Amino acid sequence: METVENKYITVAYKLYSIENGEKDFEEEAPVEHPFQFISGLGMTLEPFEAQIKDLQIGDKFDFTIPASEAYGEYDDDHVIDLPKEIFMIEGKFDSDRVVEGAVIPLMTSEGQRINGSVVEVKEDIVVMDMNHPLAGCDLNFTGEVVESRLATNEELAEVARMMGGGCGSCGCGDCGDGCGDHECGGGCCH
């Protein structure tokens, strides 16, 4: 079968993480709010797209992506100490948002937006885990293809606009805390 790039694909799925032999439910994109992406544009994990892109409407799938091909192995070096000062707002530490377990949007020195999880708040530092929440996990996807067709020029133009960068570029308005915390459904969350 010939692979066609720039296909508009919509899938309903359940995602399970597998770590140390234990399978845990992570998320669901139901038929009513399916996950949408356009193939060939890097909108989703490459192994996910490779498994889905040649399927037809109604085809069911059940596949597992190894951690090394998903979000990588968990890396202890990605747990870092950051000075508390970077979490100050108008000279005061943001104790409402910077709490254990919170996911905080940060920006690298190159301007790339990333999320980190607060591990611990100490007197002068905040311990952050910069690993993806699913690092170290194999990912099992089960679901069904809801739609699969060539993307229209309008859809491709919209993706180009969305990929322009900056908050709100996911096409669903101002994300507030970032696309990772917003259920846009437009492909920017994965």
Image: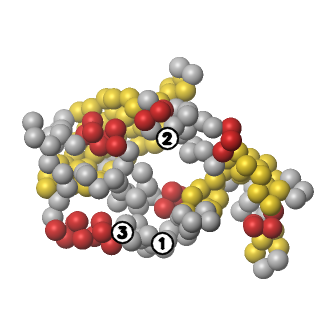
Side of 79 relative to 31 (left or right)? right
Residue reaching furthest to the bottom? 90
Q: Is residue 21 left or right of residue 34?
A: right
Q: Which residue is mark 2?
A: 71
Q: Position of residue 81 (x, y in %)?
A: 77, 52
Q: Residue at x 35, y 54 (%)?
A: 43
Q: Residue at x 16, y 68 (%)?
A: 153
Camera sees residue 101:
no
Q: Secondary structure at mark 1?
A: loop
Q: Is residue 64 above or below residue 78?
A: above
Where does residue 124 sit, x and y in percent of width and height? 87, 59
Seen in the picture, residue 148 relative to 143 is either above or below; the reply is below
Q: Amino acid at mark 1?
A: Gly
Q: Earlier in the sequence, mark 2 or mark 1?
A: 2
Looking at the image, tell me whether mark 2 or mark 3 is earlier in sequence order. 2
Rendered image: mark on residue 166: 1
Identified by mark 2, the residue type is: Tyr
Q: Which mark is residue 162?
A: 3
Q: Between marks 2 and 1, how big is the CA–CA gap?
A: 23 Å
Q: Residue at x 29, y 43 (%)?
A: 49
